[in-house]
Amino acid sequence: MSSLYLITPRAIDLAVFPAELDAALAAVPVASLLIAPEGVSEMVLQRIAEVLTPIGQRHGAAVLVAGDSRAAGRAKADGIHVASGVADLKTAVAAFQPQRIVGAGNLKTRHDAMEAAEANADYVLFGMIEAPETPDVHPKTLELAEWWAPVFQVPCVALAGSDLASVDALAEIGVDFVALRDAVWSDPRGPAAALEEAARRIAESAPETVA
């Protein structure tokens, strides 16, 4: 059954967001938390990571920082998410593994995904986390996840859409992790309720296993 991979909002206000995150993670187990604010300096990213990392770890989530190895290291995060190409991925693998996780993103083709796996990425993520989200899973994300999940040993993360109903399609495929961003943070009921619904949808849509 798929696990939850939660991505932080694009904009993070450290005056209010840590408490919101703490409450959300207390409601539902999340396997991984990706700290990925947009348009911030390295110094600001490091500060955000230093505040959020212990919150995620306290709730049992593996905490990753997007694209900045120094911020990840200084914040004592569990790993880094690399979306800047296979050369940077190999550099991160050499620096971080096996003590920390190195994930690969911005994978637009099957060739990209296979290159990431060959570079020893700990997971591959399908879906452009920096792009505006649509309600449904992006067709390319769904296509790549359907191809990858049943065949390859390297775990697969797939980005759901901004509508929680999009979780169903990914859970039915049996991806290792369903990634959520806008669907959680923009839910009018609050992020905890959104994660609870996502977890329920995953449980209801998971492929049946044969004993």
Image (cartoon, rainbow, N blue to C red):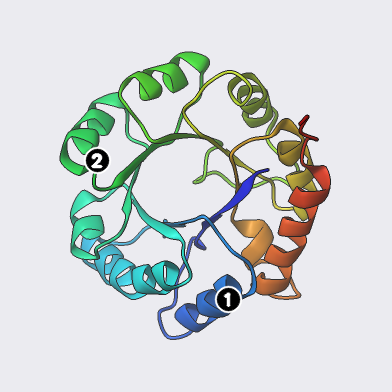
Taking 13 as reference, is 176 above or below it?
above
Q: Residue at x 78, y 29 (%)?
A: 210
- Where in the figure is residue 35, as x and y percent of width and height? 41, 59
Taking 60 as reference, is 206 above or below it?
above
Taking the image as drawn, is residue 38 in sight?
Answer: no
Cα–Cα span, label 2 and label 1: 28 Å
Quadrant of the image occupied by residue 83: top left
Structural crowding at the residue carrying mark 2, measured as other residues with C-alpha within 10 Å and reported as few (<14), some (14–19) or many (≥20): few
Taking 193 as reference, is 86 above or below it?
above
Q: Which mark is residue 199?
A: none
Q: Which mark is residue 98?
A: 2
Taking the image as drawn, is residue 25 in sight?
Answer: yes
Mark 1: secondary structure: helix
Q: Which mark is residue 26?
A: 1
The amino acid marked with disc number 1 is: Ala
Q: Residue at x 69, y 46 (%)?
A: 161
Decide which of tag 2 and tag 1 comes sooner along the chain.
1
